[in-house]
């Protein structure tokens, strides 16, 4: 059974109802795509970097309110960071920034952390060409 939106913190509800940075960056410097094989949630993260720092982050997520909220907070948290700093953020960091997630929804913060790592790997691969 899916938990209703009322089961979430005010911050989760706010990021779900008013997602920040939704969309896609054309000609992005990095792209990460992750899916949760259990629930089917997906996240596509596109990044623009300047001077080694993330200056823009946008997401496209298909999933539950917690997945959308985690994607939204992720884009806010990584802006201004280096790729290494962004990669160092954990699922707990994203969940904590949202005021916590129900135990059955922690996989949503994993989705965000994994998408950042996938984007970092993509960025390194592009830089090595």
Image (cartoon, rainbow, N blue to C red):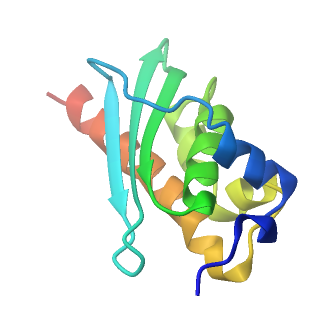
**Residue at the top extreme, as displayed:** 51
- Residue at 36% x, 71% y: name it: 40
Measured from the top left, where is residue 44 in percent x and y?
A: 37, 45
Image position of 101 (left or right of 81): right
- Residue extending farthest to the bottom is 1
Image coordinates of residue 32 in percent, x first then y, are: 34, 45
Rendered view: 115 above or below 40: above
Residue lying farthest to the left in this orientation: 129
Q: In the rendered view, does 120 fall on the left or right side of 84?
A: left
Residue 75 sits in which quadrant?
top right
Q: Residue at 48% of width from left, 20% of height from top?
A: 52
Q: Is residue 25 above or below residue 30?
A: above
Between residue 106 and residue 48, name the one nearer to us. 106
**x 47%, y 61%: residue:** 63
Q: In which quarter of the image is the C terminus?
A: top left
Q: Position of residue 97 (x, y in %)?
A: 79, 51
Q: How many labels does the image show?
A: 0
| Left or right placement of residue 85 versus residue 15 in this view | left
In terms of depth relative to the viewer, which is nearer, 14 or 99? 14
Q: Quadrant of the N terminus?
A: bottom right
Please tell me whether residue 30 is drawn above or below residue 16 in the rendered image.
above
Place of residue 92 in the rendered image (x, y in percent of width and height, measured from the top left):
71, 64
Quadrant of the image occupied by residue 6: bottom right
Q: In this view, does 26 lie to the left or right of 110?
A: left
Quadrant in which residue 39 is drawn: bottom left
Instruction: Name the residue at 60% across, 41% down.
Output: 72
């Amino acid at each position: 059974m899916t938990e209703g939106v009322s089961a979430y913190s005010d911050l989760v509800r706010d990021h779900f109802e008013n997602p920040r940075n939704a969309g896609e960056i054309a000609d992005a410097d990095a792209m990460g795509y992750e899916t949760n094989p259990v629930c089917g949630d997906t996240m596509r993260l596109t990044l623009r970097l300047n001077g080694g720092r993330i200056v823009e982050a946008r997401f496209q997520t298909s999933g539950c309110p917690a997945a959308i909220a985690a994607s939204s907070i992720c884009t806010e948290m990584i802006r201004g960071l280096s790729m290494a700093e962004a990669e160092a953020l954990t699922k707990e960091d994203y969940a904590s920034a949202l005021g916590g997630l129900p135990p059955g929804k922690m996989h949503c913060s994993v989705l965000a952390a994994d998408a950042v790592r996938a984007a970092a790997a993509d960025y390194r691969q592009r830089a090595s060409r």
